[in-house]
Amino acid sequence: MKKYISFFGLRLNMGLQYRVAAAAGIVTQFVWGFMECFVFRAFYETNPAAFPMEFKAMVSYIWLQQAFLAFFATWMMDNDIFDSILSGNIAYELCRPVSIYNMWFAKNAATRISRALLRCMPILIVAFILPEPFKMTLPKNILTFIVFMFTLALGLGVTIAFCMLVYIISFFTVSPQGVRIFFTSLVEFFCGAIVPIPFLPKPLKSIVELLPFAGMQNVPLRIYGGDIYGEELTRAVLLQTVWFVLLVLIGRGLCKIAEKKIVVQGG
């Protein structure tokens, strides 16, 4: 366990060095966040009762989505991993007395957390001091906040576990680009990154909520705004936990198969 904590710490320290990139990302996320708020506000003004979420919950959803973008953006993958698979440098990784799955998981977690740490606080501070109706509000009570933090961490785990599947599937393909584009496009729609899941048609919504993608950003962001509560909250957290465990187990199994079948050309 110590070696994986070391990998995590090294990658976290490395990620915290990119402050200029973080500043540029913050500006981009502010612009995107304001744009989303204005667009949804225009729709809500026509008939607020027709929408499945209250506007204040929608605003909190948008700002949390921007603050923790690095947690849930599946397109933010580690290009070094793909390069090592394509170039054959993965052979050096296999020589180490460590689990490739655990090492990559730790590195991915550190990268995402470091990016979020650099960007989340400025976004959240500004979001809390904005005028109504674009001001982000606090959760209803401390218990809601605790559950939000737990599901936020669990959502990060589900996202990384899913990305690990993409890395491992790349062992079995000539190029990872096709797999990467397909899965990231699929996730962006079904995880609530484009529009929140409650806005989907009911038949589709009932299916999407059972998929692992709903356990990424959909659950924690809606819990914070009070859109998920009671029995629905318990069900959502249980599904999120089950998918995290399943994705990790599937990823580990595929990783073992890939390690046995991998062939590195050259000397």
Image (cartoon, helix red, strand yellow):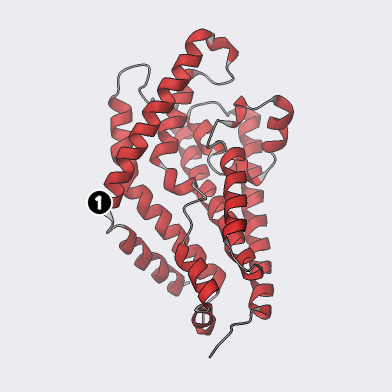
Can see residue 138? no
Tell me: 106 left or right of 171: left
- Determine the residue positioned at 56% across, 37% down: 219
Q: Is residue 121 above or below residue 10?
A: above
Q: Is residue 188 above or below residue 42?
A: below
Residue farthest top in this picture: 46
Along the viewing direction, whichever of 17 and 264 lies nearer the viewer: 264
Q: Which residue is mark 1?
A: 20
Q: Position of residue 26 (x, y in %)?
A: 31, 41
Which image quadrant for residue 141? top left
Q: Position of residue 110 (x, y in %)?
A: 41, 59
Q: Position of residue 98 (x, y in %)?
A: 52, 78
Count of picture labels: 1
Which image quadrant for residue 27? top left
Residue farthest left in this picture: 20
Tell me: 142 left or right of 170: left
Tell me: 193 left or right of 112: right
- Determine the residue positioned at 51% across, 26% down: 226
